Image: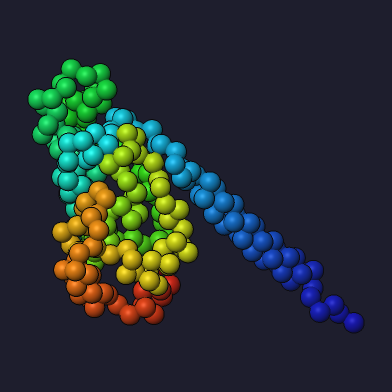
Amino acid sequence: MDPVFRRRAELGVKLAFLTLAMTVLTMLALLIWRARSYEPIGETVAQPIPFSHKHHVGDDGVDCRYCHTTVEKSAFAGMPSSAICLSCHSQLYTDQALLAPLHESSKKGLPIAWRRVHQLPDFVYFNHSAHVNHGVACVECHGRLDQMPLTWRSAPLQMQWCLACHANPTPHLRPPQKVFEMPPDALENSDVQAVARLLQRLPDQRRMTDCSTCHR
């Protein structure tokens, strides 16, 4: 009696299972590598120019939107160009060695090679404008940048952390005029009313916690 699978067919099945197993193992390895490639919480990220948010935001009061120009209108907040930096540093501290990469960037017409501190996987969609325009303050995700001489990640940015906010956004919302404050002042009566209006503009909780909201 002939076997159910002839030798070639049997070999094909084995190769298919082997390919599937290797694909799964490769994906797991990539996920583990990607997770370990993130900077640990609380550890500073080396930058081409050691930019101090503490000095610029905390001491000098520079507004987030001055450097991150598209945070209110785009998914990407934007990184400061050499032209933005030189709007001050063409006059201030021009001979500082630390600013040599800035002048080199301007001279060559190349962007400054800033490193991302808050890095999300490619399969996660995040829109800065959607968050800040709905009252989510910068401090909620980025922490007290006004106290960071060098920038580090202060929040886990994991799915459950994001879902906790999406499921109960009220404690994380501020009136539009307080979104960029460090830290936001305590809510007043008028602020509570403004937050209530923001909540009315949000999608329902089912949509807020649906997979397709962040995985598109």
Q: Horizontally, is 206 left or right of 10 in the view?
A: left
Q: Residue sitting at 17 percent across and 49 percent down?
A: 65
Q: Residue sitting at 48 percent across and 43 percent down?
A: 40
Q: Residue furthest right?
A: 1
Q: Horizontally, is 165 left or right of 110 in the view?
A: right
Is 100 placed above or below 111 here? above
The coloring applied to the image is rainbow
Q: Quadrant of residue 153?
A: top left
Which quadrant: the C terminus?
bottom left
Number of numbered discs visible in the structure rendering: 0
Which quadrant: the N terminus?
bottom right
Q: Residue sitting at 13 percent across and 25 percent down?
A: 92
Q: Where is residue 130 shown, x and y percent of the image?
A: 25, 64
Judging depth in this view, the residue of 8 and 121 nearest the camera is 121
Q: Quadrant of residue 164?
A: bottom left
Q: Residue sitting at 19 percent across and 73 percent down?
A: 193
Is 130 placed above or below 142 here? below
Q: Where is residue 150 shown, x and y percent of the image?
A: 34, 35
Question: Can the viewer see residue 174 in this picture?
Answer: yes
Judging depth in this view, the residue of 137 and 16 nearest the camera is 137
Is 48 placed above or below 115 here? above
Question: Can the viewer see residue 216 in this picture?
Answer: no
Q: Where is residue 209 shown, x and y percent of the image?
A: 41, 73
